[in-house]
Image (spheres, grey):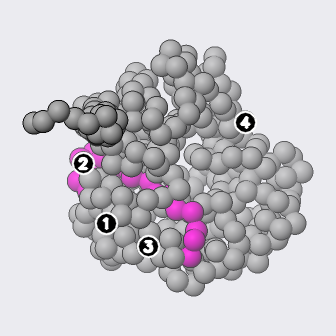
Amino acid sequence: MGVLSPQEVPMLETTIESMNISLGNPFEIRRKNFPNEITFYGPGLKPHSTSEFSGSMKEFVSISVTGNNCALNCEHCNTKMLDNMLDLPSYDGSLFDMAKNLQEKGAKGVLISGGSNIRNQVPLLPHIDDMKRIRKELGMVIRVHPGLPDEETCEALADVGVDGVMLDIIGDQETITDVYHLDAKPSDYEAVLERLQRYKIPAIPHIVLGHYFGKMNGEWAALDMIKKVPPKILVLVILLPLTGTGMEGVVPPSMEEIGTFFETARLSLPSTPILLGCARPLGNIKIEIDKSAINAGLNGIAFPSEGIVGYAQEKGLEPSFINACCGVTW
């Protein structure tokens, strides 16, 4: 190798820096691409309180447009996740009426969710006009859980101007068939990401680690799908085995598997905000998961464990707090 010219030296230094980042520490990648800040979220699904952060259930409220009814009865949920949402069918009024009432009590935003039909579609279309009024007349933030939205639903959600569409991305056929009881393919999930992009709707895909009865099956393939259509935000969650479901008693992935996936996600999407969402096992392992998320360079955590805010500060991150779903800003 010959002597480098003065013009080539800065180029080589830049190349070496890039190589160190691509091969090295995910936390350093985070530092390169984002401010030294971290956001902790308190979604309104359940009470949450530590000595460092006490969430409010009033500012961001989840609403189920189907009550606790769902045609799929997925193995990991069995409608249990709908139990903590407000039941719109039993409310004496429209979705707009409910949102207006919530705003009067201090709400700034709503998650509009519900159970799915056999095609994994939440029936949002009957409520589109109410959603438009919520946005225009009340100025509230709207997030939605649509399942696998079709063209008509995406077009309608684009007209509403939703803040984001949150959906699980499944990368393997076994999970789709055995967990969701769904007649679909992994390519259907990839098509939805492309559809949302085409309608310029902010996509907030979720990957559930251990979704196939605690095993890591299609998570890596799901990450590959998401890389092709970089989202507004990526949310990672870990299987939380719920009582009364087909996953009760299932052992979630190991800390090694979880940590490796966190790091791979950061390396794969270096400039995309990646957040640790609500669901994950409780107890001491939750603390270890939260620390692993910070070490891997994730940008935020929902329902942080005791001591995690302090841990983030020790890593040089300035904390902020929002009582809402992952990635919501007021």
Q: Main secondary structure of the magenta part?
A: loop
> Which of the two residues, 216 or 248, is positioned nearer the viewer here?
216
Q: Residue at x 63, y 17 (%)?
A: 51
Residue 152 seen by the camera? yes
Query: Mark 4: which amino acid?
Result: Ser
**What is the CA distance from the residue labelled 1 to the residue labelled 3?**
19 Å
For disc 3, the marked residue is: 194
- Within 10 Å of the Cα at label 4, are there few (<14), some (14-19), or many (20+) other Cα atoms? many
Provide the secondary structure element on which disc 1 rests. Answer: helix
Disc count in the image? 4
At 89% from the left and 51% from the top, the residue drawn is 104
Left/right of residue 113 with respect to residue 203 in the rendered view: right
- The residue stretch that appears in magenta: 199-218
Q: Which mark is residue 216?
A: 2
Does 211 appear in magenta? yes
Find the distance from the CA under tag 2 to the CA under tag 1. 14 Å
The CA span between labels 4 and 2 is 33 Å
Residue 205 in magenta? yes
Q: CA distance from mark 1 to mark 4?
A: 34 Å
Amino acid at pointer 2: Met
Q: Is 317 displayed left or right of 86 in the figure?
A: left
Residues at marks 2 and 3, CA–CA distance in whole angstroms? 24 Å
- Depth check, front residue: 328 or 63: 328
| Mark 4 vs 2: CB contact within 8 A | no
The spot of residue 118 in percent (x, y) is: 44, 77
Q: Residue at x 46, y 31 (%)?
A: 31
Which residue carries the number 4 mark? 56
Query: Which callout, 4 or 3, points to the residue nearer the camera?
Result: 3
The earlier-in-sequence mark between 4 and 3 is: 4
Residue 243 location, x and y as percent?
Answer: 42, 43
Amino acid on which the number 1 mark rests in the picture: Ile
